[in-house]
Image (cartoon, coloured by chain):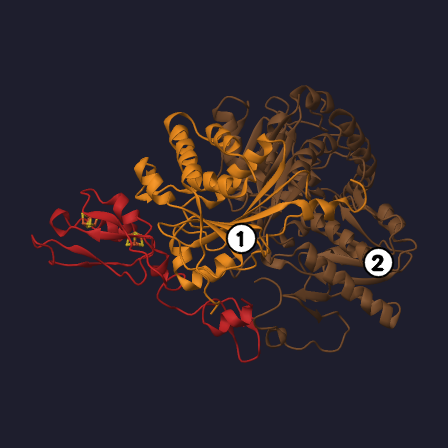
Amino acid sequence: MSGVEAARRGLVARIDPAGHPLPLSEAAPGSAGRTGFWRTHRPVLEPARCVGCYLCWLYCPEDVIEMAEGAGPRGQAVPVIDYEYCKGCGVCVDVCPTRALKLVEEPIGEG
Amino acid sequence: MEPGGFLEALQRAVELRFHGRGGQGAVTAATLLVRAAMIEGKWGQSIPSFGAERRGAHVLAFARIAGRPVPVHSMVRRPHVVVVLDPSLVYVESERAKVVRGIRPGGVIVANVPKPPRLEAGARLYTVNATRIAEELGLVVAGWPVVNTAMLGALAKATGVVSIDSVVEAILGYWRGRVAELNAEAARRAYRETREAIVERVAAR
Amino acid sequence: MPARMGLRGNEAVAYAVKLARVEVVAAYPITPQTIVVEKIDELISKGEMDAEMIHVESEHSALAAAYGAAVGGVRAFTATASHGLAYMYEMLWWTAASRIPLVMAIITRAIGPPWNIHVEHADIMSTRDTGWLISMAENNQEALDLTIIMFRVTEDPRVYLPGIVGLDGFILSHTVEPVEIPDQEAVDAFLPPRRQPYTIEPGDPKAMGNLVPDEYFEELRMDMHRSMLEARRVIMEAGREYGKLTGRDYSGLVECYRCGDADTLIVGMGSWMGDAKVAVDMLREKGLRAGALRLRWVRPFPWEELREAGLGKRLVVVLDRSISFGHAGPLFLEVSSALEARPSMVGVPAGIGGVDISYEDIARIVEEAYGMVEERGRVFIPVYWYHLGRFYRLSPGAAPPEAVARAAPGAGGGGG
Ligand code: SF4
Ligand code: SF4
């Protein structure tokens, strides 16, 4: 992809009215576009095991976890994952102290 | 080096491209391949391509194997062999386009897939279910099956660019103890289970 | 028996540091240099290497600590890249002008913004005027060999200046290829015990960096220049002796491939010069008499070698992996100063920020330049930028360049 193409897609650079490419990118959701399709495995929550500790929220490198206050079965906060952008890295699963999050293989099919 | 020797050395080299997702060990696979080649007295080179080198991103690694040194360091643009570590890279159309790009006529694709996929023809396809092999052997790190060593076994079977014995020796020299044994077993099992797939010819879209 | 291993360029450098019996390493991690320091740490922790690793908080401190150790009388080493080198820049001057031998690896990388961790020579070329010797490896074997040779050259009393070994970020630093590791005995025979002009130690105080008369300052500077010129002979001697011990001769400050009967020379440095050799073979098959001249050393500058190589040539194409904004590629500027015979010259900046350049691209570049000479006779084009398969003439003094962003191609051309 040429720089100009990248600029047109709003990913990497911007071009100012005088014609200079600039080292700027537009604020946009997703640090690298729709990272959801990178996923081979999906983190899935078992709400009963969650203790609402926020660790997954804190560690998610893509910042795609929102905590829903009071939404858990015992009134605890539970994570809600945006699967559009969750890249399936499993960091949240790794840090969860109660194994409330598990990695489940994504179904694969013809694209 | 006699004049003209460098081009000839390159022309005789086998050029490979590995596709995986960040964290799956495509770069390690390419490195182990070079070590296996060196065990056989060959020259080898593995080049990682670092783009969005993050866990989960589509990452590439390149390798060249030859009888004598090839001085180039640029990326492989027209591979003889493509190794695919992750099934989704074959099934998702946008990713598949990257997998087949530039492959030489008569080249070989070695893919980790549960069932033979639809692929634009022009290359021979070999498949193995490396994910299942890794899971059955318990080769899973942080929820991710480790498929790279199995795929080296598959590569040895499909192409013979290195022998399975050299692959196993390279693996045993890279890790120690039980991890080494399991990875070597993954390579051996994949070697046995790799099959040439009958490619259903579909027109390139 | 020397061992052969499949090593990344960074690991090759680490093994060289071990073989040179370096006693103090101080470094701060930066991509793509990190593996050098990690590997040295690993060698120390396994007991294979007897050295002190100082983990510092910045690159300025990294060189300051290594320099301090070197002034104290031990062999010292550091490594960096890009922004890290920019941050330690002041210390480069302190080290060189103190006449303290020290070796540093620069794993060449672009300097931001925007962010880019890939290869470019802007960082290493910014050290040209600091009084450090500068060499540049083509492959991982050379990265190892040049590091060992650099210790010997920098510690030679005729030189007493620090030295840089450059290797291309990722392209060499992270690429695995066979590397022959010399025996410790061979390296010990090659590298005499450390020599340096003075040490500063407790009990024998000296002051450094005090105010001196301007005339004396000027003499100090010009003596650095004299020593740098002298270094050429020292490099040739050391390189020849290294060849006797290892079978790999480094007596040349440049390496020539099919230069002798060539009428067209490709000149450059670093890893892509391997691709240039294949390009030479390709061009020869098409009847174009090409040769490749690679600068293994940038400081001291191989002026005599270039002047001689340029004699009788019709065209010299200089490949640059960075640009001196408003003028031309730094290597073009250096090389053109040595070509007294005034052949046609075309300077081609390319591959900046890690854009992949292959033997096919280089052959294409030479054919394009050769075509211009065939058409117009002698040409002198300092900047003929090659980008994604197209050329842009951006020389000083040329017609006002079009806004490049608008002229740049869309899809198509070479790889992205
Ligand atoms: S797997 Fe977990 S940590 Fe990783 S991106 Fe998805 S939600 Fe975030
Ligand atoms: S880390 Fe686990 S327990 Fe803590 S909030 Fe997240 S899911 Fe719940």
Q: Quadrant of the N terminus of chain C?
A: top right
Which percent across, then down, holds residue C219? 80, 42
Q: Which chain is orange?
A: B
Q: The numbered mark 2 sits on a residue in which chain?
A: C
How much space separates mark 1 and mark 2, taking CA atoms?
A: 39 Å
Labels 1 and 2 in the same subunit = yes
Give the drawing colour for chain A: red
Foreground mark, 1 or 2?
2
Residue C358 placed where, x, y %? 66, 55
Label of residue C160 in the image: none
Q: Quickly name the residue at label 1.
A: C117
Residue ID at (26%, 61%): A82
**Quadrant including the C terminus of chain C:** bottom right
Chain letter of the brown region: C
Visible in this render: residue C74?
no
Q: Furthest-front residue in view? A: B198
> What's the amino acid at mark 2?
Gly
**Residue B45: x, y in percent?**
60, 41
Exactly how many numbered labels are in the figure?
2
**Which of the numbered marks, if any, corresponds to residue C287?**
2
